[in-house]
Amino acid sequence: MENVVIIGSGPSAHTAAIYTARANLNPLLFEGMMAGGIAAGGQLTTTTEVGNFPGFPEGITGLELMLKMREQSLKYGARIQTSTVDKIDTSHKPFQVFSEGIATQTKTIIIATGAIAKRLRIKGEDNFWQRGISACAVCDGGLPIFRNKPLAVIGGGDTAIEEATYLTKFASKVYLIVRRDVLRASKVMQKKLEENPKIEILWHSNALEALGENSLEKLVVRNNKTNEEKTLEVRGLFYAIGHAPNTIFLDGQIDLDESGYIKTIPGTTQTNVKGVFACGDVQDKIYRQAITAAGSGCMAALEVERYLTEQK
Ligand SMILES: Cc1cc2nc3c(=O)[nH]c(=O)nc-3n(C[C@H](O)[C@H](O)[C@H](O)COP(=O)(O)OP(=O)(O)OC[C@H]3O[C@@H](n4cnc5c(N)ncnc54)[C@H](O)[C@@H]3O)c2cc1C
């Protein structure tokens, strides 16, 4: 029987693996096999440069960073299984974790399955993904290619306004592309928007096609009321249309919020099931950064250790 099974392979899973391995808990980590369409290593494997993870002043690519974390997990004795967890059973103890038809019994589970940033899959998007098109303004907005250039953000919620406002620090102008004629964002956020002269809202609009040579140069947008099309000369396009947390495999056993994120007791990684913990983006819709994911992975590991000691 396992002390702890960790499900996931991003910064939160590997931090939890490093801590639980160093605490002699001999963790077993399921890193997934293209789980949710993303390679083992998680969201950072889909980006190029990561400039905001402390310890790498010269920068590091997302893939390299995740390979280093994986290496560190192995170095301290974590066992890594390259398969996806299809279901768990928390109805009785020990818990069971199922992957490729094999059941593993475990005293505790850390769920670190992350989330997937939604994309619109417009024409040309694949050509310019991470070459002008991104799903994270806080991560990528400060890159030199976006400085003093017109940029666009797609979305109508709080995140979209926050990202558009953040980008005005670097951009010459920011277009906010909104599908309808209203914003879903809170009144406070809308006020922030109105007060920012660098932001222009394009109501009733849909992005159609990304154009350029080596990086994004233009975005074709259509007004869905008038069908009028126009081409924006933007060097950056940021999706702020939400994330999908990887929680479907939990099949109702762990409490989720209305958007599918795992609910944890505030200030902890404890879920509604004692002995099951959640960390990283799968339980965080606010910060969604590698460092915050890693921080909560550390919390989950320490809480597992404490829980197992209490059970003895
Ligand atoms: C394009 C992009 C650029 C980004 N750039 C930065 C940046 O520069 N700096 C920064 O701090 N943050 C950045 N982020 C955000 C950062 O990647 C995330 O906050 C962070 O990766 C979340 O880590 P996590 O541990 O929650 O898991 P994730 O990175 O979301 O990884 C979880 C992984 O677990 C695996 N998995 C899922 N389900 C299962 C299952 N059932 N069984 C087994 N395995 C499973 C999958 O491989 C999944 O991808 C970026 C995000 C994106 C999308």
Image (tube, rainbow, N blue to C red):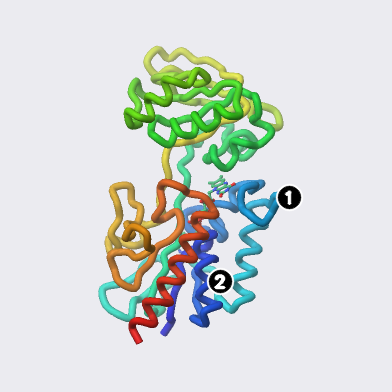
- Mark 2 burial class by Cα count in 10 Å: few <14, some 14-19, many 20+: many
At label 1, which amino acid type do we have? Glu
Please, is residue 5 above or below residue 153 in the view? Answer: below
> Residue at 40% of width from left, 48% of height from top?
285
Residue 165, numbered circle:
none
- Residue appearing at x 32%, y 64% in the figure: 271
Looking at the picture, does residue 122 appear above or below residue 105?
above
In the picture of the structure, the residue carrying the numbered disc 1 is 58
Q: State left or right for residue 226 relative to residue 256.
A: right
Residue 279, position in %: x, y? 43, 61
Judged left or right of residue 101, residue 44 is right
Q: Position of residue 221 (x, y in %)?
A: 50, 21
Q: Position of residue 213 (x, y in %)?
A: 70, 28
Secondary structure under badge 2?
helix
Is residue 43 or residue 76 the one in the foreground? 76
Q: Amino acid at mark 2?
A: Ile
- Where residue 18 is drawn, which disc sits there? 2
* Quadrant assignment for the N terminus: bottom left
Residue 159's quadrant in the figure?
top left
Q: Nearer the viewer, residue 34 or 137?
A: 137
Q: Looking at the image, tell me whether mark 1 or mark 2 is earlier in sequence order.
A: 2
Rendered-image quadrant of the C terminus: bottom left
Residue at 67 percent across and 51 percent down: it is 61
Residue 80, position as x, y percentages in the image = 55, 73
Residue found at the far right of this picture: 58
Q: Is mark 1 within 8 Å of ligand 1?
A: no
Decide: is 312 above or below 235.
below
C-alpha span from label 1 to label 2: 24 Å
User: Quadrant location of residue 214?
Assistant: top right
